[in-house]
Image (cartoon, rainbow, N blue to C red):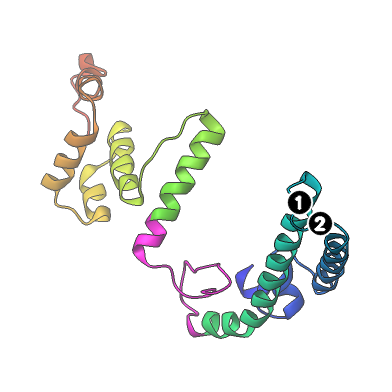
């Protein structure tokens, strides 16, 4: 979508939910609001006066942001072209196309997990991308896959993998792993 967004000004504006004619509509609304504001006492603290004042300010900001987006289109296109191999990029119009740094990416994943867990479970759970390595190790161990292969994939020694497992598996998990099908005399793969 990002690559497609910079192909034309219309697509760039659509990426932000705007159309080229929106600025004209905003300017007309602003002109109407300013005319209405002139007909009332500006020193009045009535709700009508305050609402019109807010409307004027809001429309001025909308027009300013619209113009900033228009002027940033070429810059965004250039930045995206300069970073063709970036897997994760910034989408804010001022930095559009620049690669996300590690801290920003971790932050986005953490926030996404919080929002997603709240939407699905009604409770926020916080984790970070590195924790997915621990979660993967735990689940692979649970289904008794070869931990040597897992160690290799994670770039760990078998000893390091064992330390991770001990950190993340509860006593109950360890006990279940130990006693599952004990009568067969088979040891789980580790």
Q: In the image, residue 26 lies at what x, y percent? A: 81, 67
Q: Which image quarter is the C terminus in?
A: top left
53 to 94, vertically: above or below: above
- The answer to whether the residues at label 2 and label 1 have Cβ atoms under 8 Å apart is yes
**SS assignment at label 2:** loop
Which image quarter: residue 120? top right
Q: Is residue 173 left or right of residue 45?
A: left
* Outermost residue, top side: 183
Rounded to the nearest angstrom, the CA distance separating label 2 from label 1 is: 5 Å
Q: Is residue 123 left or right of residue 147?
A: right
Q: In the rendered image, which residue does mark 1 sit on? A: 44
Q: Is residue 145 left or right of residue 24?
A: left
**SS assignment at label 1:** loop
Is residue 104 inside the magenta stretch?
yes
Q: Is residue 149 left or right of residue 105?
A: left
Is residue 94 inside the magenta stretch?
yes
Which image quarter: residue 172? top left
Is residue 70 or residue 179 the one in the foreground? 70
Q: In the rendered image, which residue does mark 2 sit on? A: 41
Q: In the image, residue 174 lies at what x, y percent? A: 21, 25
**Is residue 82 visible in the rendered structure shown here?**
yes
Q: Specify the principal SS of the magenta part.
A: loop
Q: Which residues are magenta?
A: 82-106
**Is residue 190 visible in the rendered structure shown here?**
no
187 to 71, vertically: above or below: above
């Amino acid at each position: 979508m990002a690559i497609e967004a910079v192909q034309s000004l219309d697509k760039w504006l659509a990426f932000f939910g705007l159309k080229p004619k929106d600025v004209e509509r905003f300017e007309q609304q602003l002109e109407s609001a300013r005319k209405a504001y002139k007909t009332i006492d500006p020193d009045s603290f009535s709700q009508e006066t305050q609402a019109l004042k807010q409307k004027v300010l809001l429309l001025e900001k909308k027009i300013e942001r619209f113009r900033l987006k228009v002027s940033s289109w070429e810059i965004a296109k250039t930045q995206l072209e300069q970073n063709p191999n970036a897997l994760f990029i910034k989408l804010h119009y001022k930095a559009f196309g620049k690669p996300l740094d590690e801290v920003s990416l971790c932050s986005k994943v953490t926030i996404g997990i919080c929002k997603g867990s709240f939407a699905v479970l009604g409770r926020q759970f916080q984790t970070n991308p590195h924790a997915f390595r621990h979660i993967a190790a735990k689940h692979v161990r649970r289904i008794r896959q070869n931990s040597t292969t897992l160690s290799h994939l994670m770039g760990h020694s078998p000893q390091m993998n064992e330390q991770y497992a001990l950190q993340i598996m509860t006593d109950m998990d360890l006990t279940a792993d130990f006693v599952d099908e004990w009568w067969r005399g088979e040891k789980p793969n580790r």
